[in-house]
């Protein structure tokens, strides 16, 4: 086999597949006429081609249909079927949504507060001016009532004391020095009692939330009215009976003080 | 429901293909399939299932795997038909899917499944795995040739087998083959002539 034969043999399959130029084809044909080994090589290729082409297709064992239930279009397919305008609109809408979502998430806040967790997307709202909490209202009301009570009690006390002192002045001629001393002592004690009573009432107001402040105030007021009325009655009797004996006056005053103490308890 | 679906499809498909030129009809079916029309797509299946199945059969040498692969090819084609550009022929695109599917399967196979003419497996054993041949006169010789060709093809690397399959059995041009397997034209030719050189040794001296 010459070098020429080697070159021509490479051309044989190309010639059989029409992959040669006209010049190459003519050169090969000329060579094959004179070269038996190359002609035999061509026969081998022809036989190979023949066998390849004789092996025709086998029948299909079944059909390979696609059924609607297994061929649901994907989102990508659906998007691919849209026109360009719709695709652009959808893309713009998606981008806008993504932008808003990103904005929301950048200012998202999760924190715990008394009573639970707080989850917020977006900027924190401006603090709203709100009225005092109910507990603050109650305290203010209590202090206001206490202050009012103290003022009222002080006025009442002063009124009682003035009344008592006026009665003492009126009955000064009828009372001995001892009686006056006893009466002044009693008045001082009464004043002290009234003050203590006010302090106790305020403490009671603060400690006993379940009790109505209004009821307590009305009770105290009623008691004071009763006290004052009782004291006035007693002093009126003293005035009327200015000539009674000193021991009787002592007894009356003693009784009067006992009654006042009992009322204040 | 499946029977009625198939019967409708088969009935229509026997009438429709002769109404219009093949190529125009195929374009219309592809367009309808892009809109999700399974009936239109199944007409394409009817038209191409035999070439695709035989391609898979010659590439994979296993009827069951070839059928499975063919089904996957059509399913994949339907799902991705939105990507198909009308510039190329539908068949070229379909062959590309089928060839990728087959080569991928061949590459996943363990090394010991590569057969040789010297191993203990006979032509008959291969024949028994293939579909029963036509029961006409001379079918035996035809089946023998077919098996011999299949055995010879098994000795080719998948890339050479693919080129040979597309050239000899699917009658594609060199340019179409280059488009299907996406390699340069020169590579297609070199692979093809290398494959023919091997086959000439194995088949050339056998009688047809």
Image (cartoon, helix red, strand yellow):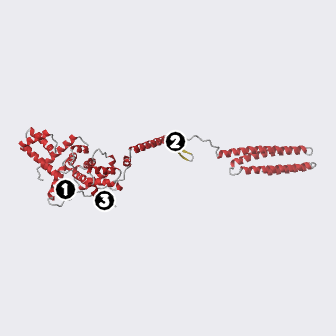
Tell me if I can see residue B65 in this picture: no
Secondary structure beneath dot 1 equals helix
The quarter holding residue A196 reads top right
List x then y, in percent, for residue A256.
85, 50
- Which of B42 and B183 lies nearest the eye of the viewer? B42
User: Which residue corresponds to mark 2?
Assistant: A122
Extreme residue toward the front, this view: B19
Work out which residue is located at the far right of the displayed protein and give it: A243
| Residue indicated by mark 1 | B126
For the residue labelled by badge 3, is the local secondary structure a helix, a strand or a loop?
Answer: helix
- Nearest the eye: B85 or A108: B85
| Residue B6 disc label | 3
Q: Chain of mark 1?
A: B
Distance from label 2 to label 1 (Cα)?
71 Å
Mark 3 and mark 1 on one chain: yes
Asked if the residue at tag 2 contacts the one at tag 3, i.e. Cβ–Cβ closer than 8 Å, the answer is no
């Amino acid at each position: 086999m010459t070098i020429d034969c080697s070159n021509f043999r490479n051309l044989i399959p190309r010639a059989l597949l029409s992959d040669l130029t006209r010049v190459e084809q003519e050169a090969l044909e000329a060579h094959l006429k004179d070269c038996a080994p190359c002609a035999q090589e061509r026969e081998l290729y022809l036989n190979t081609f023949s066998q390849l082409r004789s092996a025709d297709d086998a029948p299909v064992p079944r059909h390979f249909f696609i059924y609607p239930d297994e061929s649901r279009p994907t989102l990508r397919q659906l998007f691919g079927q849209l026109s360009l305008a719709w695709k652009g609109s959808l893309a713009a809408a998606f981008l806008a949504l993504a932008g808003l979502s990103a904005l929301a998430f950048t200012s998202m806040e999760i924190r715990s507060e008394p009573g639970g967790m707080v989850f917020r997307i977006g900027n924190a709202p401006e603090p709203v001016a709100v009225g005092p909490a109910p507990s603050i209202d109650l305290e203010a009301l209590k202090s206001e009532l206490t202050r009012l009570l103290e003022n009222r009690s002080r006025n009442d006390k002063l009124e009682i004391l003035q009344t008592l002192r006026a009665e003492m002045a009126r009955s000064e001629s009828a009372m001995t020095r001892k009686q006056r001393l006893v009466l002044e002592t009693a008045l001082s004690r009464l004043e002290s009692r009234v003050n203590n009573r006010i302090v106790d009432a305020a403490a009671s107001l603060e400690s006993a939330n379940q009790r109505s402040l209004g009821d307590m105030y009305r009770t105290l007021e009623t008691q004071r009215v009763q006290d004052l009325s009782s004291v006035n009655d007693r002093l009126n009797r003293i005035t009327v009976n200015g000539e009674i004996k000193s021991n009787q006056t002592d007894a009356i005053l003693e009784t009067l003080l006992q009654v006042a103490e009992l009322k204040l308890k | 429901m499946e029977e009625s679906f198939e019967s409708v499809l088969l009935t229509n498909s026997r009438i429709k293909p002769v109404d219009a030129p093949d190529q125009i009809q195929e374009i219309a079916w592809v367009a309808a399939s892009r809109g999700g029309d399974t009936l239109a797509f199944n007409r394409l299946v009817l038209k191409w299932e035999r070439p695709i199945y035989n391609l898979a059969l010659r590439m994979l040498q296993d009827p069951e795997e070839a059928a499975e692969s063919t089904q996957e090819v059509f399913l994949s084609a339907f799902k991705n038909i939105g990507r198909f550009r009308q510039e190329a022929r539908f068949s070229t695109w379909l062959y590309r899917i089928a060839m990728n599917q087959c080569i991928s399967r061949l590459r996943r196979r363990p090394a010991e499944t590569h057969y040789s003419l010297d191993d203990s497996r006979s032509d008959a054993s291969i024949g028994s795995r293939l579909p029963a041949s036509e029961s006409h006169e001379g079918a035996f010789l035809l089946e023998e040739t077919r098996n011999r060709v299949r055995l010879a093809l098994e000795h080719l690397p998948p890339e050479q087998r693919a080129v040979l399959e597309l050239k000899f059995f699917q009658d594609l041009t060199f340019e179409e083959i280059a488009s299907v397997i996406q390699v340069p034209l020169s590579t297609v030719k070199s692979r093809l002539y290398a494959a023919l050189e091997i086959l000439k040794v194995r088949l050339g001296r056998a009688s047809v």
